[in-house]
Image: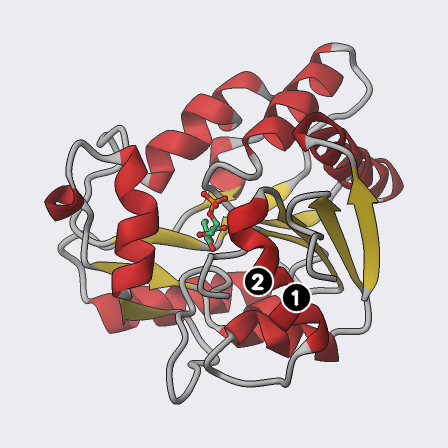
Amino acid sequence: MEIKTVNNYRELSEKAAAIVAGELNRRPDSVLGLATGSTPEGMYAQLVKMYNKKEIDFNDVVTFNLDEYAGLSPEHPQSYHFYMYSNFFDHINIKPGNIHIPYCGDQDLDLACKEYDQKIKDAGGINLQILGLGVNGHIGFNEPCEYLYTDTHLVDLTAETIEANSRFFSSREEVPRQAVTMGVASIMHAEKILLMAAGENKARAVQLMCCGRITTSLPASLLQLHRNIVLIVDREAAALL
Ligand code: F6R
């Protein structure tokens, strides 16, 4: 695991965007795995700036998002669909057909999950996977549990995640209790992983992820087994390393 410690969130976002840009310039038809949440917002803003300056191009890029809440329509302002379009896709030249986000609508969910994994395989797998880190050590919405799922699946969110994400909703009660997430196989099969963590509330999870035992009770610890992972942390998140 290569660890890059930066001074602040701006530097974290710039460094992360530079890594994504490097990947796109090397391979214009890259398959990107994308995360939502507070952490990558600055990176997306930076990538949009680079696109506007014609430093990068998304014409041939394919994306797969990690997760989506169950029970929120794509138009809901807190859905990850809404987040991705408003923060990123609406501002770049990606082809709509190349965007993939799990969706928990009325369709057969098992089938939809299988189709999602098949689409990732058909695209040749993920070249660069962007990850954030849950305060409880989740990646995607693979929550601490006795066991982990390899494939895309429906998950019950833990009380910690519901609490952490309640900051985006007007009350804790409004936070969906379930989500669809990519499983750990698609993440671990990515050629390269870029994980970002910022803020002191991530310090313990960062410490356990990097230096603790590999355990399903901290899903990010599995990343110790990945051969090509870059971790960008600000000083607060790196405090216990
Ligand atoms: C979001 C995702 C989650 C977040 C994590 C950290 O797509 O997969 O694992 O990355 O919950 O969220 P923030 O960045 O809001 O602290």
Residue 204 numbered tag:
2
Q: Position of residue 151 (x, y in %)?
A: 44, 76
Mark 1 C-beta closer than 8 Å to ligand 1? no
The N terminus - image quarter:
bottom right
Residue at (66% x, 63% y) in the render: 124
The C terminus - image quarter:
bottom right
Q: Is residue 87 left or right of residue 172?
A: right
Picture quarter containing residue 80?
top left
Q: How far apart are the alpha carbons under marks 2 and 1?
A: 5 Å
Residue at (54% x, 85% y) in the render: 215
Residue carrying label 1: 207
Q: Is residue 6 left or right of residue 35?
A: right
Q: Position of residue 237 (x, y in %)?
A: 64, 49
Disc 2 crowd rating (10 Å Cα; few below 14, some 14-19, many 20+) is some
Give the camera-side residue of 131 and 22: 131
Circles 2 and 1, Cβ within 8 Å, touching? The answer is: yes
In the depicted structure, whether residue 59 falls above or below residue 120: above
In the depicted structure, whether residue 232 falls above or below residue 74: below
Disc 2 marks which amino acid? Arg
Give the camera-side residue of 76 and 170: 170
In the depicted structure, whether residue 162 falls above or below residue 216: above
Disc 1 marks which amino acid? Gln
Q: Position of residue 17 (x, y in %)?
A: 74, 33
